[in-house]
Image (cartoon, rainbow, N blue to C red):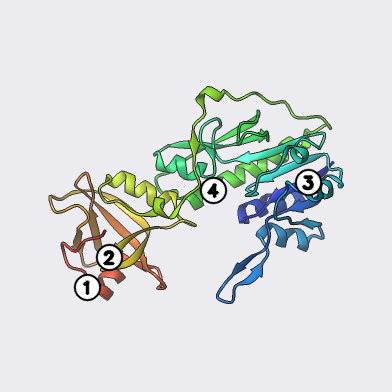
Amino acid sequence: MKIGFFGTPEHSAILLKSLIDNGFNVSFVVTNMDKPQGRDRRLAPSFVKKIALANNIPVLQFNTLKEENAIQEINSYNADIYLVYAFGSIIPRKIFDFPIGKTINLHGSILPEFRGASPIQAAILNNYLETGLTLQYITDELDAGSIISIVKVNIEESDTFGTLLDKLTIIGVNEIIKLLRSFDGKPLQSTEQDHSKATFCKKIKVEDRKIDFNLSDLEIHNKVRAFNPGNICFTTFRDKRLNVYKTTKTELKSDEKIGSLQILDKKTFGVVCGNKKIIILDEVQFENKKVMKSSDFINGFRPQNGELFI
């Protein structure tokens, strides 16, 4: 069996490496274009590209997959099945419908819920206690293809986007390897989605990351968890942007102004939320500075009760 692989970030590279380590024949990899990184803005390859090159797998990169030359080059490998995990670009029908085993996508929710770009974040934002990974066939409509299998996972209160993504990647790797071993040259059995139950999530924008302390402590806590790492939440303190990496909910209440700072002890400070509960900011960071604990923030900046986060 020959596999064509589409992916870009680190968790996608984990799946690719597992396929290689388990002896599967990955004929080629399609990944996004190299992007400038660091202070010198040098072009850097994706995680998937690094793994592919280290294993002598051909790497294909295109500005768009809609051009005929891209379609012809990808399909010229005559792979039996295509796998997609966090590729980041639209794949046209002439590509996803080409292999005999069609094209399987790994999506980070229990479809048809949370179709779109941020399903893992959406589950945390909505205070879900369970989510999952869906293996589905790609169709023209985003995340609407028939379902091959679903694997569920619990969401712990300590989970962030990063830890939950790690969990889903591990179970996704195991599930896809199991399914590929049962592949007999025909499309795998699948079930049509109930499209009437579809919900959607969007690509995260900068304004989504801004903390509104008029929200409840639970809503703020979930937002900080959902966007860490990659899209860290932020507020403004003393006219400077302050990133918030970690929070803790408390049962403490205050009648002080919403958004006002409250010193709880020498090591801890919190902020009054919209439901009048105090949320602790455990780890914060001013722009271009190191991430610091709550105690370091207190010692270094001497905040006063009543100062506002806006």
Image-based side of 269 in relation to 42, left or right = left
Q: CA distance from mark 2 to mark 4?
A: 31 Å
Q: Quadrant of the N terminus?
A: top right
Q: Earlier in the sequence, mark 3 or mark 2?
A: 3
Mark 2 or 1, which is nearer the eye? Answer: 2
The residue where tag 2 is placed is: 237
Residue 241 visible to an observer of this rendering:
yes
Image position, residue 295 (x, y; %): 28, 68
Q: CA distance from mark 2 to mark 1?
A: 12 Å
Q: Earlier in the sequence, mark 4 or mark 3?
A: 3
Q: Residues within 10 Å of mark 3 (few under 14, many from 20)?
A: many
Secondary structure under the numbered disc 1 in the rendered image: loop
Residue at 55% x, 75% y is 39
Q: Nearer the viewer, mark 4 or mark 3?
A: 3
- N-terminal of the two: label 2 or label 1? 2
Q: For residue 4, which numbered disc appears in the image?
A: 3
Point out the tag, 2 or 4, that comes first from the N-terminus: 4
**Viewer-nearest of discs 3 and 2:** 2
Mark 1 or mark 3: which comes first in sequence?
A: 3
Q: Nearer the viewer, mark 1 or mark 3?
A: 3
Are there few (<14), some (14-19), or many (20+) residues within 10 Å of tag 2? some
Classify mark 1: residues with Cα within 10 Å, few (<14), some (14-19) or many (20+).
few
Q: CA distance from mark 1 to mark 4?
A: 37 Å
| Residue to which mark 1 is pinned | 302
